[in-house]
Each structure stands twice: as structure tokens, then as C-alpha cells.
């Protein structure tokens, strides 16, 4: 996982409308194809705005959607996602190369040992806010949800977002949206054993797009760290043991599904 984090961080800042974001999407797509998935790049437009104090242009980004062979989106399944982009002044090792690489590793493991429910893995474009006092964000996951048919939406049993999962912390944060049903987050914690995790609430990642339309959703990650959204978010801030812990929590939940 660390090699992938180093590769992504070396691309530099990956604003959603930038060539670097396109390179990141190609890199993640290649990993998922190598793992045995049918990968589709779904383009979407993003507006100009101000991201973390820096003006960013309008443009096009993509969602990278990875489906296992024979996947039927109208049949029961779960979605695991992580966002591709960074704020424009950060190489984003923790935010969010860490989530992308844990996702890619768990995707590889899931292809080798499929569980009872299929898993659809998605690298979402344009999660970072582009204005609106932080409200104009999660464009990729909102586009993904909006494109689902009614049958496809009903088939999703749960969605987990991996966002900032590598900063060292003894327990892995498992968050639900404040005011929403915490059953999915509770199920993840139960599968991993509560000692390995801690409960939290969070309303600032791609899981919110799913929860807003009634799909149970949770987020793994969100440990505070000094390099957040800065040029200092480099691979050294990511702890290999925490990556493994986060991956183990997700894997335990996937294996528990019936």
C-alpha cells in the first residue's frame, strides 16, 4: 500500500479538474483492473470555485467504478469508496492516497476470496469542497448516486467511505452521519470487535451522498493531524500499521456480510 501512496503523492496536488487527477484515476484504475475487476471511468463536470483558499478551474473529472465479473447492480451488494482528489496545495498522502490504497488492497483480497455479497469499489472524483462555505463538495459520489436506477439504489445494502485512514491511532474511527441510523457503523465495529475501533459522527465525505438518499453509509477514518490540507501531507505522515488496521476493519465487515 505504501508504494501506491508514494506514487500518488509524487504526482503532486490532484485538484479534481487537473491533469494530475486524471493520472491518479488512471493509476487506481490500473490497480483495480490488475486485481480482476471490470473498470469503467465515468466522466462528470465540476465547477470553478475556491478550494481551501485557492481558486480552482471548472473542468471534468471521473469516477472510477470497479465491478467484479458477472456483477448485476440490481442484485444485493455493497459499495466501498475513496476519493481521488486533493486540495490544490497538498500532495495528499493521507488525504486521500491512504484511502485509495487501502481500498485497492481490500479489492484485491475480495477478488481472491469473494464473500456472500458482491462489492462494488469506486474511486470518486471531486470530493473536496469547491466553495459554498464547504457545502459544494462530493461531486463524484453525488453524480454516482444520481445515476442509479431505483432498482440499483434499493440493491445497495450499505456504503463505506475510506477517507484519511492512515494517521496513527490505536482505534480506527468508524463514523456515521449525525442524526442518521448508526446501524451500519455499529455492524462494522461489531465485525471488527469494538476494541479495534471507536464510534464517531462525520458529515464531510462521500458517505453523506449515500445517506442522503436513504442508503446506510459509514466512514472509516478522520484522525486529526497537523499536515491536514497542506503541503506537508506527505507519505511520512502515514503509518503502515494504521493502514493495516483500517484494512482489517473493512475486511472483517465484508467477510461478515450475509
Image (tube, rainbow, N blue to C red):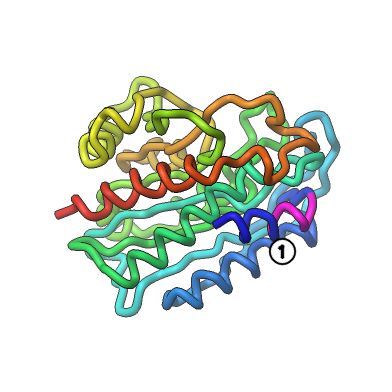
Which residue is disc 1 drawn over? 22
Q: Residue at x 36, y 59 (%)?
A: 149
The percent coordinates of residue 242 (x first, y second) are 48, 40
Q: Residue furthest top?
A: 179
Q: Residue at x 34, y 71 (%)?
A: 111
Q: Residue furthest right?
A: 55
The percent coordinates of residue 19 (x first, y second) are 79, 62
Q: Residue at x 34, y 78 (%)?
A: 69
Residue span colored magenta = 8-12
Q: Is residue 139 left or right of residue 201?
A: right
Q: Residues within 10 Å of mark 1 (few under 14, many from 20)?
A: some
Q: Is residue 16 left or right of residue 110?
A: right
Question: If the image is split into quadrants, where does the C terminus sit?
Answer: bottom left
The percent coordinates of residue 146 (x first, y second) are 46, 52
Q: Depth check: 224 or 54 in front?
A: 224
**Measured along the vertical axis of the image, is residue 42 above or below residue 89?**
below
Q: Residue at x 42, y 43 (%)?
A: 246
Q: Assign the magenta stretch its main secondary structure.
A: helix
Amino acid at each position: 500500500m505504501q508504494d501506491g501512496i508514494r506514487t500518488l503523492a509524487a504526482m503532486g496536488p490532484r485538484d479534481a479538474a487537473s491533469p494530475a487527477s486524471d493520472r491518479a484515476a488512471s493509476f487506481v484504475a490500473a490497480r483495480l483492473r490488475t486485481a480482476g475487476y471490470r473498470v469503467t471511468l465515468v466522466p462528470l463536470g465540476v465547477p470553478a470555485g475556491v478550494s481551501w483558499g485557492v481558486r480552482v478551474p471548472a473542468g471534468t473529472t471521473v469516477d472510477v467504478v470497479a465491478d467484479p465479473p458477472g456483477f448485476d447492480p440490481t442484485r444485493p451488494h455493497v459499495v466501498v469508496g475513496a476519493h481521488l482528489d486533493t486540495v490544490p496545495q497538498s500532495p495528499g498522502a493521507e488525504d486521500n492516497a491512504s484511502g485509495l490504497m487501502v481500498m485497492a488492497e481490500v479489492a484485491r483480497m475480495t477478488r481472491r476470496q469473494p464473500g456472500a455479497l458482491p462489492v462494488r469499489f469506486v474511486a470518486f472524483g471531486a470530493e473536496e469542497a469547491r466553495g459554498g462555505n464547504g457545502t459544494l463538495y462530493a461531486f463524484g459520489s453525488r453524480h454516482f448516486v444520481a445515476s442509479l436506477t431505483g432498482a440499483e439504489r434499493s440493491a445497495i445494502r450499505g456504503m463505506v467511505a475510506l477517507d484519511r485512514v492512515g494517521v496513527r491511532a490505536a482505534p480506527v474511527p468508524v463514523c456515521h452521519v449525525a442524526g442518521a441510523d448508526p446501524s451500519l457503523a455499529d455492524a462494522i465495529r461489531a465485525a471488527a470487535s469494538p476494541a479495534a475501533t471507536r464510534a464517531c459522527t462525520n458529515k464531510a465525505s462521500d458517505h453523506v451522498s449515500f445517506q442522503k438518499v436513504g442508503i446506510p453509509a459509514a466512514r472509516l477514518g478522520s484522525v486529526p493531524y497537523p499536515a491536514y490540507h497542506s503541503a506537508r501531507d506527505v507519505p511520512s505522515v502515514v503509518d503502515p500499521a494504521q493502514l493495516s488496521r483500517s484494512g482489517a476493519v473493512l475486511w472483517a465487515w465484508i467477510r461478515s456480510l450475509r
